[in-house]
Image (cartoon, rainbow, N blue to C red):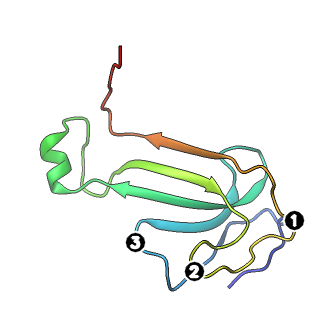
């Protein structure tokens, strides 16, 4: 699987038999810092239905949105991924759908 070494600057993928499609567990350059960190990445890709209902999307498979959360352990199998436990977890949601909602 993978070691808990965080100081190595290279992409690592944790492959867990329990995770579903559209989910990655990776150690990569963080969306939040300049260093590599373990992250749970959940993505949604466009389907034909999405293309028919959203003129902003151009092709099937295009990423519509992603949510990225720093993690200490695999949420599916429980494997410890890092040596030093983060006590402050960062997260972000990126929406590329082109939709906009005005809440007034």
Q: Which residue is mark 2?
A: 15
What residue do we see at 57% from left, 52% from top? 68
Left or right of 17 in this view: 29: right
> What is the distance, in whole Å, between disc 2 and disc 1 at their CAs?
21 Å
Q: Quick one: label 2 or label 3, which is nearer the N terminus?
A: 2
Whether 42 is drawn above or below 14: the answer is: above
Q: Which residue is mark 3?
A: 21
Rendering coords of residue 95 (x, y %): 42, 40
Assess whether mark 1 and mark 2 are in contact (beta carbons under 8 angstroms).
no
Rendering coords of residue 74 (x, y %): 64, 73
Which picture quadrant has residue 87? bottom right
- Badge 2 crowding class, 10 Å Cα cut-off, few under 14, some 14 to 19, many 20 or more, is few
Left or right of 13 in this view: 62: left
Instruction: Give the quadrant of the C terminus.
Output: top left
> What is the distance, in whole Å, between disc 3 and disc 1 at their CAs?
28 Å
Rendering coords of residue 94 (x, y %): 48, 41
Element at badge 3? Answer: loop
Instruction: Give the quadrant of the N terminus.
Output: bottom right
Whether 98 is drawn above or below 83: the answer is: above
From the image, state whether disc 2 or disc 1 is nearer to you.
Answer: 1
Assess whether mark 1 and mark 3 are in contact (beta carbons under 8 angstroms).
no
Nearest the viewer among 95 and 90 is 90
Q: Which residue is mark 1?
A: 84
Nearest the viewer among 100 and 2 is 100
Q: Residue furthest left?
A: 52
What residue do we see at 83% from left, 65% from top? 6
- Badge 1 crowding class, 10 Å Cα cut-off, few under 14, some 14 to 19, many 20 or more, is few
Q: Quick one: label 2 or label 1, which is nearer the N terminus?
A: 2
Element at badge 2? Answer: loop
Whether 103 is drawn above or below 21: the answer is: above
């Amino acid at each position: 699987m993978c070691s808990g070494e965080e100081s190595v600057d290279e992409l690592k993928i944790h492959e867990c038999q329990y995770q579903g499609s559209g989910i990655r567990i990776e150690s990569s350059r963080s969306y939040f810092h300049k260093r590599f960190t373990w992250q749970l990445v959940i993505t949604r890709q466009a389907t034909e239905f999405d293309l028919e209902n959203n003129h902003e999307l151009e092709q099937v498979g295009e990423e519509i949105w992603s949510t990225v959360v720093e993690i200490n352990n695999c949420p599916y199998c429980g494997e410890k991924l890092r040596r030093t436990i983060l006590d402050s977890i960062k997260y972000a949601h990126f929406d590329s759908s082109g939709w906009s909602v005005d809440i007034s």
